[in-house]
Image: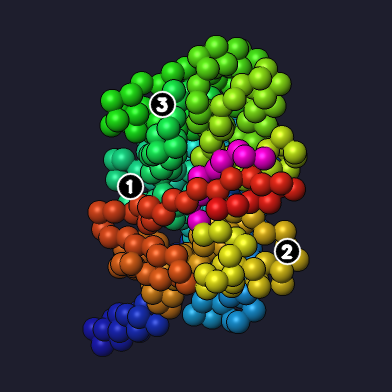
Amino acid sequence: MKSLLAGLLAACVAMAAAPARAEDGVTADRILLGQSAAFTGPAAQLGIQMRNGIKAYFDHVNARGGVHGRKLELLSLDDGYEPARCAPNTKRFIEQDKVFALIGYVGTPTMAAAYPIHTQARVPLVGPFTGAEILRAPFNRYIFHVRASYYDETEKIVEQVISTGGRQIAVFYQNDSYGQAGLKGVEIAMQKRGLKIAALGTVERNTVQVEAAVTAIRAARPDAVVMISAYTSIAEFVRQMQKAGSPATFYNVSFVGSKALADALGKDGVGVAISQVVPFPWGPAVPVVREYQQLSEKAGHGDFNFGAMEGFLVAKVFVEGLQRAGRTLTREGFIDAMERMRDVDLGGFFIGYSPSNHAGSKFVDLTIIGRGGKFLR
């Protein structure tokens, strides 16, 4: 009996001394994260800029010892802005690479493909580069947004058009969940003012076949066109509309990729407007912008832009959540810590979450492309 009791006691001691099972993606000195985004194809600059911003801040944190002694490691996979590639990327991150969390995904259709996968696996995803309502309602515990929604952006755009005397507003949109999300936002903003959309035109994702859209929208003679697509198709649409003699003003939501659009349009971009959901990347009076500029230059990316600014903010939010979660890191503990972030000042940009609201921010600003591709507020 004594030997049996001694054996049981020894087993209990051994079990108590054994380390608890570590969370996937977390070791004593590392936290592994996954990002699926476009790094090739017509939307490549969106993913490249997002990753550059995230990496600039992560590299800074790692150089200072990481978070609670753990360095941040980012795995990035190219999905070409195609849902059929994003879904297997997400499964690989979770099932093979066993990342702790996902970060900085780019696009509505791609996020729609990833959404059921990471949600079912209960893997948090922070800072998707999309403002689509389908990822916000109904509420999802495993997604944290850093940017304002497309509804917020299109409301701001319609308000601006109406305030300057415009009434006839057309919509050019990508024929997928991203374009439809933006279209719905314009419809809501117009209905609020007792107005209807003047004309519609569509383009297929990752193409520049805009001729039918130009014909349909130009015929309506709109005062303004709200555009919800990627920079390559929008650049082609604007050029063809201008060539056809349309006097309309052109407005984009932020996902267009502002710097990429300005580069694609060249001199034809002067006067094209874009709503923004992050602070002006060239305004060093804002503390977080100044920090972004310094760390971006240190990382070798001195060509400031809105996409990298957003990635930088996403990384700051993620690190803030990790710091609050403490040394004993689990996914559920991280989510709980993020939900305790109420009105947190990241340096002139405020973010806030709760157990019932993961929207993060409603900040929207308007910019226009000036001469030489420079942005004006």
Contact, CB < 8 Å: mark 3 with mark 2? Answer: no
Question: Magenta stretch containing residue 272, yes or no?
Answer: yes
The three-letter amino acid code for the residue at tag 1 is Asn
Q: Nearer the viewer, residue 138 or 274?
A: 274
Q: To which residue does mark 1 refer?
A: 140
Which numbered disc flags the more N-terminal residue, 3 or 2? 3
Disc 1 or disc 2, which is closer to the eye?
2
Measured as percent of width and height from the top left, residue 365 is found at 47, 51
Residue 265 in view here: yes
Residue depicted at x 56% and y 41%: 273
Residue that protrudes farthest toward the front in the picture: 165
In the rendering, which numbered label is found on residue 167? Answer: 3
Q: To which residue does mark 2 refer?
A: 302
State the SS at label 2.
loop
Total count of labels: 3
Q: Nearer the viewer, residue 333 or 240?
A: 240
State how far apart marks 1 and 2 are (Cα): 36 Å
Query: Up-down: is 148 above or below 223?
Result: below
Q: Which residues are magenta?
A: 270-278
Residue depicted at x 26% and y 84%: 5
Which numbered disc flags the more N-terminal residue, 1 or 2? 1
Q: Is residue 265 left or right of residue 324?
A: right
Residue depicted at x 40% and y 38%: 163
